[in-house]
């Protein structure tokens, strides 16, 4: 049997071409997954550095300065240190719940990034129920904290987990009612549609001006959801050692640390999308239409500008939760629940009623 060498070479080259196509296909599938994860990780590192620098400025002291230029690698150094620390397990605790808890907290917050638009149609999942999907997913995180508290077999941890669950339930309802008011104004629950509804009227069309009461309630509720001061009762150091984090060490403690900053970034991004016009550069007394024409001419340029505007608004807004950490004292548990149920819930209901009435009258 005579085998033609040219045929063999052709078969080999074809098989190589097919395998290369498969490799490129896998790479193209992985790029959209790892790009947002890398961006979110860098975003969290920037938040940690910003918080330390702003805190140092407020307290008139020197912040991080040795790890990298201006101390920007300090958060990376802390993460590396936690990565190599020993991972301890409580002897009489439920090790399965203890191990699963931090993962649930982080994964539920990471999933929230699916519906956040960073630019003109630059969103992982443009769903018609985008904002409500975020609320549904974010309500899973306290379950992870409760599992961590129960699995630790420690009264301080369990009390911290219970507080986290009670706090989340109390402040999720006003938060949802504020989001519902925005959906009524925009005639959509899609995050992309909400941003585009604000862009029609320029700077004065931002929901910040149309929903000032809702914005204040949303701000307070999101601070409580992120467990930031003055709402950090689940991990109050003076009362509960470190709350649900008491028994944790190493990478699992690091996951809680990352989860708190991921949640803070998600909340700030949603404030930008729902109330501050998202990726639109709507400045007063500047012809907005010309700016939109510039961004729509070059798609890549427009996308980069959109991402930059969204992140600039987000990080400017982050100054508020960072500043409140060193400004306001911690509330008591009864004050925290009273604020949620007796003040924010009726105010958010009234705001929803006013929004519904105005929408009906405008028909």
Image (cartoon, grey):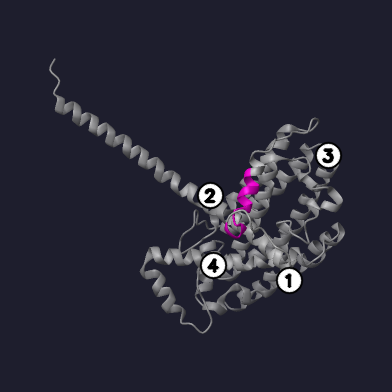
Q: Residue at x 70, y 73 (%)?
A: 213
Of the image marks 3 and 4, the number of the one nearer the N terminus:
3
Report if the CB atoms under discs 2 and 4 are less than 8 Å apart.
Answer: no
254 versus 60 height, above or below: above
How dense is the environment of label 3, judged by Cα within 10 Å: few (below 14), some, or many (20 and up)?
some
Nearer to us in this view, 162 or 360: 162
Q: Secondary structure at mark 1?
A: helix
Residue 261 percent location from the top left of the image:
65, 54
Disc 2 designates what residue? 37
Which numbered mark, 1 or 4, is in the foreground of this view?
A: 4
Left of 177 or right of it: where is 3? Answer: left
Left of 169 or right of it: where is 282? Answer: left
Of the image marks 2 and 3, the number of the one nearer the N terminus:
2
Of the image marks 2 and 1, the number of the one nearer the N terminus:
2
Mark 2 and mark 1: Cα distance apart in space: 39 Å
Per the rendered image, the range of residues in magenta is 69-80
Q: Residue furthest top?
A: 1
How dense is the environment of label 2, judged by Cα within 10 Å: few (below 14), some, or many (20 and up)?
some
71 versus 295 height, above or below: above
Residue 170 percent location from the top left of the image:
77, 57
Q: Which mark, by number, is residue 111?
A: none
Residue 113 percent location from the top left of the image:
56, 54
328 versus 73 height, above or below: below
Disc 4 designates what residue? 278
Residue 219 visible to an observer of this rendering? no
Q: Which mark, by number, is residue 350?
A: 1
Q: Secondary structure at mark 3?
A: loop
């Amino acid at each position: 049997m005579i085998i033609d060498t040219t045929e063999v070479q052709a078969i080999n080259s074809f098989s190589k071409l097919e395998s290369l196509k498969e490799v490129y296909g896998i790479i193209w599938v992985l790029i959209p997954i790892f790009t947002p994860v890398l961006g979110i990780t860098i975003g969290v590192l920037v938040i940690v550095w910003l918080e330390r620098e702003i805190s140092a400025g407020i307290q008139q002291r020197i912040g991080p300065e040795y790890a990298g230029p201006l101390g920007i690698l300090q958060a990376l150094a802390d993460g590396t240190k936690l990565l190599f620390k020993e991972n301890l397990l409580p002897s009489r605790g439920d090790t399965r719940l203890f191990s699963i808890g931090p993962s649930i907290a982080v994964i539920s917050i990471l999933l929230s990034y699916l519906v956040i638009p960073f630019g003109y149609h630059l969103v992982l999942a443009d769903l018609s129920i985008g904002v409500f999907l975020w609320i549904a997913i974010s309500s899973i995180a306290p379950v992870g904290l409760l599992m961590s508290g129960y699995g630790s077999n420690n009264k301080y941890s369990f009390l911290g987990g219970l507080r986290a669950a009670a706090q989340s339930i109390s402040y999720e309802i006003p938060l949802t009612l504020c989001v519902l008011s925005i959906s009524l104004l925009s005639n959509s629950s899609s995050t992309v549609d909400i941003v585009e509804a604000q862009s029609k009227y320029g700077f004065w069309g931002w929901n910040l001006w149309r929903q000032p009461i809702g914005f204040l309630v949303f701000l307070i509720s999101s601070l409580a959801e992120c467990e930031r001061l003055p709402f950090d009762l689940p991990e109050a150091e003076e009362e509960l050692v470190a709350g649900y984090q008491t028994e944790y060490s190493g990478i699992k403690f690091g996951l809680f640390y990352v989860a708190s900053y991921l949640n803070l970034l998600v909340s700030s991004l949603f404030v930008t999308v729902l109330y501050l016009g998202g990726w639109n550069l709507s400045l007063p007394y500047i012809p907005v239409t010309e700016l939109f024409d510039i961004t729509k001419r070059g798609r890549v340029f427009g996308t980069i500008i959109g991402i930059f505007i969204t992140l600039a608004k987000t990080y400017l807004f982050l100054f508020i939760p960072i500043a409140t950490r060193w400004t306001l004292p911690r509330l008591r548990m009864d004050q925290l629940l009273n604020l949620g149920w007796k003040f924010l819930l009726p105010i958010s209901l009234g705001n929803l009623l006013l929004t519904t009435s105005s929408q009906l009258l405008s028909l």
